């Protein structure tokens, strides 16, 4: 439960920070960086969700390897 709440806060903060960055940059700066002002916050939130999903998958692989008895450690 706490993990879900923490992740929701981190994802929301990533979107908020991305929106703040997009609002404080000029159109030229955004174009040079390849950032779309309208989609940048959502893309930042999706990247955070994907990062959390990747960590969950990595943890699941380590747990399944331990269950099988392989003792493989994630790099």
Image (cartoon, rainbow, N blue to C red):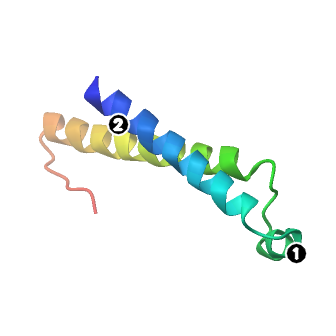
* Point 86% across, 71% down: residue: 31
Q: Identify whether 14 is placed above or below 35.
A: above
| Picture layout, residue 4 above or below residue 16 | above
Tell me if 52 is positioned left or right of 44 in this view.
left
Determine which of the numbered discs, if any, sits on residue 6 in the image.
Answer: 2
Where residue 71 sits: x, y (%)?
Answer: 13, 49
Residue at mark 1: 28
Residue name at image x 21 percent, y 38 percent: 63
Q: Where is residue 18 drawn, in percent x and y?
A: 63, 55
> What is the count of numbered marks?
2
Quarter of the image with the N terminus in it: top left
Are there few (<14), some (14-19), or many (20+) residues within 10 Å of tag 1?
A: few
Label 2 crowd (10 A; few <14 / some 14-19 / many >=20): few
Question: How much space separates mark 1 and mark 2, taking CA atoms?
Answer: 35 Å
Q: Residue at x 30, y 32 (%)?
A: 3
Q: Residue furthest front?
A: 24
Whether residue 47 is visible: no
* Disc marking residue 12: none
The first of marks 1 and 2 along the sequence is: 2
The quadrant of the rendering that contains the C terminus is: bottom left
Q: Residue at x 34, y 46 (%)?
A: 58
From the viewer's perspective, tell me whether residue 72 is left or right of residue 50.
left
Left or right, 31 with reference to 74: right
């Amino acid at each position: 439960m706490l993990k879900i709440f923490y992740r929701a806060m981190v994802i929301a903060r990533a979107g908020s920070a991305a929106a703040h960055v997009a609002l404080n940059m000029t159109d030229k700066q955004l174009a040079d960086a390849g950032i779309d002002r309208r989609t940048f916050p959502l893309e930042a939130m999706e990247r955070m969700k994907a990062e959390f999903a990747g960590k969950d998958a990595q943890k699941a692989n380590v747990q399944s390897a331990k269950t099988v008895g392989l003792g493989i450690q994630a790099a």
